[in-house]
Image: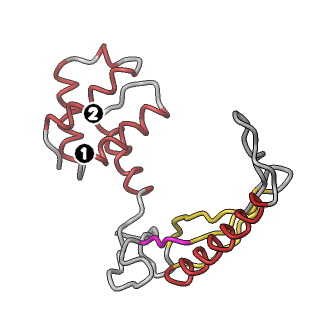
Amino acid sequence: MISFDQAADQIARLDATDNYHWKTEQAIEELTTCLMRNSTDEAEARRAISSWLSAQRECPTPADLIAALAEVREAAPAAQHSPTCKKCLGTGFQLVHQLATPTIGGATLVQDLGSGNDGWKAADAFRDQWDIEHKAWIANHPKPEKGQYYKPERRQYVAEAARRCDCGAGTKGKR
């Protein structure tokens, strides 16, 4: 349950709908009370109102609000944290390192370097090797004149990304 003021703030966003202005003060209060009693937190109420505004033009009824909240709950992944997981530390996501290689057509090929310490070691080794090669390239090319820059080169780079952990945390499940 959220506070009446929090619910009223969210209901006020419905001002953008077509028939909101025709609603009586009592009807607006009823919508606010419905949202207050049926929302578990303000973020859920915000998501339900945002979902309604993006899909509907008419102001919702209390039954519509309850249905919108149910859809938001259905779409939200249930928290199934595994605090003992050493890969994600219970967050459901792990940091992975990827080697990205731009291609001539503009696409980028991505190769996993791994996660955890193995990923860090592979990424650091790649970065060290790139530094050596880049310094050698600079040494073999004339220094640009003032106001000019080195022509950008196509090169590989290491990207860090989040990936869902396979331990089950962060996956959608039943509440």
Looking at numbered disc 2 in the image, what kind of residue is underneath it?
Gln
| Outermost residue toward the top in this view | 22
Contact? badges 1 and 2 (CB < 8 Å): yes
Q: Nearer the viewer, residue 124 or 105?
A: 124
The image quarter in which residue 75 lies: bottom left
Q: Is residue 46 magenta?
A: no
Secondary structure mostly seen in magenta is: strand
Residue 141 vs 92, above or below: the answer is: above
Q: Residue at x 59, y 79 (%)?
A: 114
Labelled disc at residue 42 = 1
Disc tally is 2
Labelled disc at residue 10 = 2
Relative horizontal placement of residue 63, taking residue 1 as reference (left or right): right
Relative horizontal placement of residue 117, taking residue 67 as reference (left or right): right
Q: Secondary structure at mark 1?
A: helix
Looking at numbered disc 1 in the image, what kind of residue is underneath it?
Glu
Magenta-drawn segment: 92-96
